[in-house]
Amino acid sequence: MKDERLLEMRVFRTVVETGGFTSAAHGLGVSQPFVSQTIQRLEARLGAKLLHRTTRGHRLTAEGERFLDTARRVIDLVEQAEADWQRGEAQVEGHLRVSAPIAFGLDRVTPHMPDFLNRHPNLSIDLRLTDDQESLIDDRIDVAIRMGALPDSGLMHRRLCGLQRIIVAAPDLVARYGEPHGLEDLSAMPCLAWDGSRDHLNRWKFVQDGEAVTFRAASRFRSNQGMTLFQMCLAGVGVMRMAEHLARPAIDRGHLVQLLPAITVRDDGAIHAVFLPDRHLVPRIRSFIDFMAAAFRDPDWEEGTGGQSGMRSDGTT
């Protein structure tokens, strides 16, 4: 029988510590209904009301205060027991579930996996590559590699390296349309666009004539999968705003050319390892995060910038 008591304790603790169901859902990377249903199941199983719901939020009942103290002690004991069991590099073992975007996962994460597995022969890894943002709780993810600006949440994260996206196209596409010298020229060229939850990446930022301008990339071809867009760009189907980890090597090989570098606005995002609070204390998780931070400390695709790392819990970089 599936035992979700520890999960219920974690959700309850997060609701209390973040101040509500919605903020707890953001912090845990789950839906608000999931949080509500989990608390309802917990209260039904215990036969006690743990939270008073009001128009201003939630406050603990007397039973809730007692259970919160117990839940915190149980979670701390579980974390400590696991840490004690796996303490030391030679004892890193168990199973690790990692989620990463498809293109970055294939291009940059996967090549490092043989070395990491060789260092930890008693550890197994489930590497899940998806451009959808998976829930750390629902999908039982230990570490998620996420790109771009992070929302405010109760999740912990560690910055692995910077993230820059640049405008690129295949040489034959540029030969057909001519090299653009401004946004009017760019608007006459076919573009490649993201679909679904990545639609915000279709708003390209420029500075033209001293003014900030947003160019909306419209396209005959859209996809929710980064590697598909990359392949279409290489094939000369359209112009793409592409992460440098893919773009720079392709430029060096002569497969792509950069467009409008003088007016392209630099991103302020980064690539992070994201995980649940306190999970970095678990040796297998901590070892993976440390390994990734070292691997991307000085990315070979960055131009004139170095990676920086630092652990935060407030969603900033």
Image (cartoon, rainbow, N blue to C red):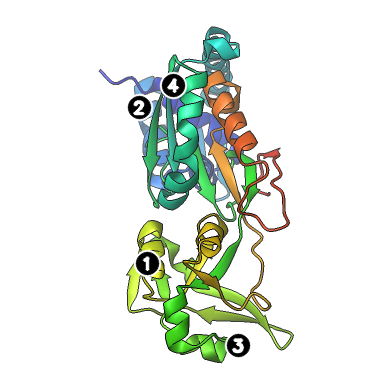
Circle 3/circle 4 CB separation < 8 Å = no
- Upstream in the sequence, badge 3 or badge 4? 4
Q: Is residue 131 above or below residue 78?
A: below
Q: Which residue is mark 3?
A: 181
Of discs 3 and 2, which sits in the foreground?
Answer: 3
Q: Position of residue 238 (x, y in %)?
A: 41, 76
- Upstream in the sequence, badge 2 or badge 4? 4
Distance between mark 4 and mark 1 Cα atoms: 37 Å
Q: Is residue 47 above or below residue 312?
A: above
Distance between mark 3 and mark 4 Cα atoms: 58 Å
Distance between mark 1 and mark 3 Cα atoms: 27 Å
Q: Position of residue 111 (x, y in %)?
A: 47, 38
The residue positioned farthest toward the left in the image shown: 1
- Upstream in the sequence, badge 1 or badge 3? 3
Distance between mark 3 and mark 2 Cα atoms: 65 Å
Q: Which residue is mark 2?
A: 44
Mark 3: few/some/many CA within 10 Å (<14, 14-19, 20+)? few
Distance between mark 2 and mark 4 Cα atoms: 16 Å
Which residue is located at x 36 percent, y 68 percent?
Answer: 232
Q: Which residue is mark 1?
A: 195
Which residue is located at x 72 percent, y 54 percent?
Answer: 305
